[in-house]
């Protein structure tokens, strides 16, 4: 599932994205036969995959300061068992010519 929003609050532009997924692995880890090019292969029981959940979040806020300057703050995070749990923040200042 993926949701997003983009809009303004006063003079701050905001964009956010939220993603949730439930992951069952690949054909090789699914437990049934699968096709690879022209071969029909059987899944390997040593690689069976237990379904896992993943949530990803992105939030960006930007504001113009006049004189063609713009500043922004971005935050993103991943939580779950598919990807490593991580988070990061970026602060930016840009000038248009």
Image (cartoon, grey):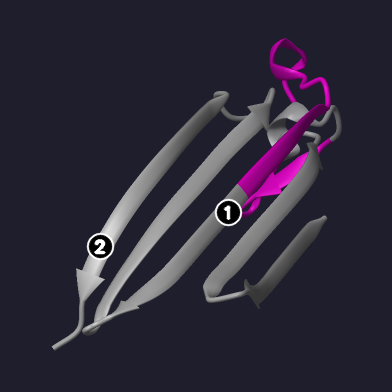
Mark 1 surroundings: few (<14), some (14-19) or many (≥20) residues within 10 A: some
Q: Residue at point 65% right, 43% down? A: 56
Residue 49 appears left or right of 87: right
* Residue occupied by mark 1: 59
Q: Secondary structure at mark 1?
A: strand
- Work out whether residue 80 or residue 52 is closer to the camera in this orientation and state it: 80
Query: Can you say which quadrant of the picture contains the C terminus?
Result: bottom left
**Picture quarter containing residue 68?**
bottom left
Compared with 38, 23 (above or below) is: above
Query: Which residue of the protein is positioned furthest toward the top in this rendering?
Result: 46
Residue 34 among those drawn in magenta: yes
Q: Secondary structure at mark 2?
A: strand
Compared with 65, 75 (above or below) is: above
Whether residue 20 appears in this view of the structure is yes
Q: Residue at point 58% right, 29% down? A: 83
Residue 89: give x, y in percent of width and height: 42, 41
The magenta segment is: 33-57
User: Which disc, if any, is residue 14?
Assistant: none
Compared with 20, 2 (above or below) is: below
Query: Can you say which quadrant of the picture contains the N terminus?
Result: bottom right
Query: Which residue of the protein is positioned furthest toward the left in this rendering?
Result: 97
Compute the Cα span from label 1 to label 2: 17 Å
Question: Foreground mark, 1 or 2?
Answer: 2
Q: Residue at point 70% right, 32% down? A: 28
Residue 69 appears left or right of 8: left
Residue 71: give x, y in percent of width and height: 33, 64
* Residue occupied by mark 2: 93
Mark 2 surroundings: few (<14), some (14-19) or many (≥20) residues within 10 A: few
Residue 5: give x, y in percent of width and height: 71, 69
């Amino acid at each position: 599932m993926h949701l997003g929003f983009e809009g303004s609050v006063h003079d701050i532009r905001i964009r956010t994205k939220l993603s949730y997924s439930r992951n069952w692995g690949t054909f090789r880890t699914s437990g049934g036969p699968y096709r690879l090019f022209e071969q029909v292969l059987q899944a390997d029981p040593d690689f069976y995959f237990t379904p896992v959940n993943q949530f990803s979040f992105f939030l960006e806020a930007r504001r113009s300061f006049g004189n063609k300057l713009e500043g922004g703050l971005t935050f993103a995070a991943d939580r779950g068992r598919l990807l490593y749990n991580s988070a990061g923040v970026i602060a930016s200042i840009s000038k248009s010519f």
